[in-house]
Image: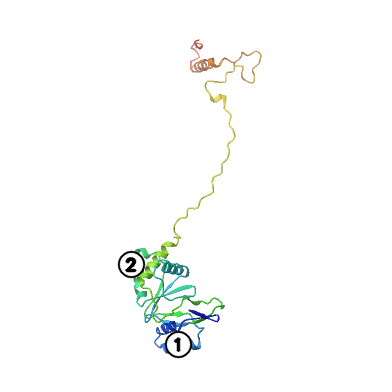
């Protein structure tokens, strides 16, 4: 499109190409002269086919065509969706390719308009300061024979765009909250847990220790006293238990 005095125009050559899609090109040109601000309906299958894509996915497809592919032909918007003009016969072929190609299952449903279908094209003129309209040109035709992508080119771009978007069914690994670390209270050793220092009522280490109790045995005699105590508990009452002392 070209701009003059805050108005966007489709070029004369572009208008001629669009009018050639109609059975009555002259009548279509006359209609645009009288109502240049109104969208019109043109049939597919004569001059072009069209592929209708979801809005966000269609933008990804256009990015792939321009960044990694050969570019695109005329492109328009229609009620939040993207209309890509393709060569005649590409709509039917693309519909077939999307059915049997396994790696094309990631592509969202597309509307392929071919012979017998009609689409709404944006107006040939638009005010630059006008509010956003449901129909407008993204890439307007500017020649008598604009280049149009085929089914294989558009399929390639659709597959690349589908693989670049995240899969909603894939599990998301969100890092969970870190477990709280609780500090355990300091533990003190339990003298009863050590078999080498049994609690002996005759030893003077308990709270009842007094002047009448003998002092605790040396550290070297504790094992012998513990052994004698275990023998005393295990032996029958009628047996005489020998007192075991440590050999010096």
Query: Is 121 left or right of 156, judged from the image as shown?
Result: right
Q: Earlier in the sequence, mark 1 or mark 2?
A: 1
Please, is residue 5 above or below residue 212 in the view? Answer: below
Q: Position of residue 198 (x, y in %)?
A: 55, 20
Name the one closer to the observer, 181 or 159.
159
Is label 1 in contact with label 2 (beta carbons under 8 Å)? no
Name the one closer to the observer, 86 or 95.
86
Q: Position of residue 89 (x, y in %)?
A: 34, 76
Quarter residue 108 falls in: bottom left
Please, is residue 189 above or below residue 31 in the view? Answer: above
Quarter residue 83 falls in: bottom left
List the residue tagged with mark 2: 100
- Colour scheme in use: rainbow
The secondary element bearing badge 2 is classed as helix
Q: Position of residue 6 (x, y in %)?
A: 55, 80
List the residue tagged with mark 1: 29
Q: CA distance from mark 1 to mark 2?
A: 41 Å
Task: Please rate how many residues cluster around mark 2, counting C-alpha atoms within 10 Å: few if below 14, some from 14 to 19, many from 20.
Answer: few
Name the one closer to the observer, 84 or 225.
84
Q: Residue at x 42, y 89 (%)?
A: 26
Q: Residue furthest right?
A: 211
Q: Position of residue 135 (x, y in %)?
A: 49, 77
Q: Nearer the viewer, mark 1 or mark 2?
A: 1
The secondary element bearing badge 1 is classed as helix
Please, is residue 39 above or below residue 105 in the view? Answer: below
Please, is residue 79 above or below residue 19 in the view? Answer: above
């Amino acid at each position: 499109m070209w701009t003059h005095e805050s108005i966007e125009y489709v070029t004369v050559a572009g208008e001629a190409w669009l009018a050639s899609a109609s059975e009555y090109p002259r009548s279509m040109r006359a209609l645009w002269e009288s109502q240049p601000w109104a969208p019109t309906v043109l049939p597919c299958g004569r001059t072009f086919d069209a592929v209708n894509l979801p809005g966000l996915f269609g933008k990804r497809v256009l990015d792939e065509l321009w960044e990694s592919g050969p570019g695109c032909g005329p492109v328009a918007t229609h009620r939040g969706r993207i209309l890509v003009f393709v060569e005649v016969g590409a709509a039917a072929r693309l519909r077939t390719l999307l059915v049997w190609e396994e790696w094309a299952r990631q592509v969202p449903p597309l509307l392929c308009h071919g012979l017998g279908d009609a689409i709404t094209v944006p107006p040939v003129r638009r005010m630059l300061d006008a509010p956003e309209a449901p129909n407008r040109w993204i890439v307007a035709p500017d020649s008598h024979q604009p280049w149009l992508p085929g089914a294989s080119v558009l399929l390639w771009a659709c597959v690349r765009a589908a693989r670049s978007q995240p899969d909603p069914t894939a599990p998301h690994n969100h890092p969970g909250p870190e477990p709280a670390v609780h500090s355990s209270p300091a533990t003190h050793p339990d003298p009863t847990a050590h078999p080498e220092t049994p609690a002996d009522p005759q030893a003077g280490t308990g709270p009842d220790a007094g002047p009448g109790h003998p002092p605790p045995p040396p550290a070297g005699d504790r094992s012998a006293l513990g052994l004698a105590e275990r023998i005393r508990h295990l032996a029958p009452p009628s047996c005489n238990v020998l007192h075991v002392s440590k050999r010096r």
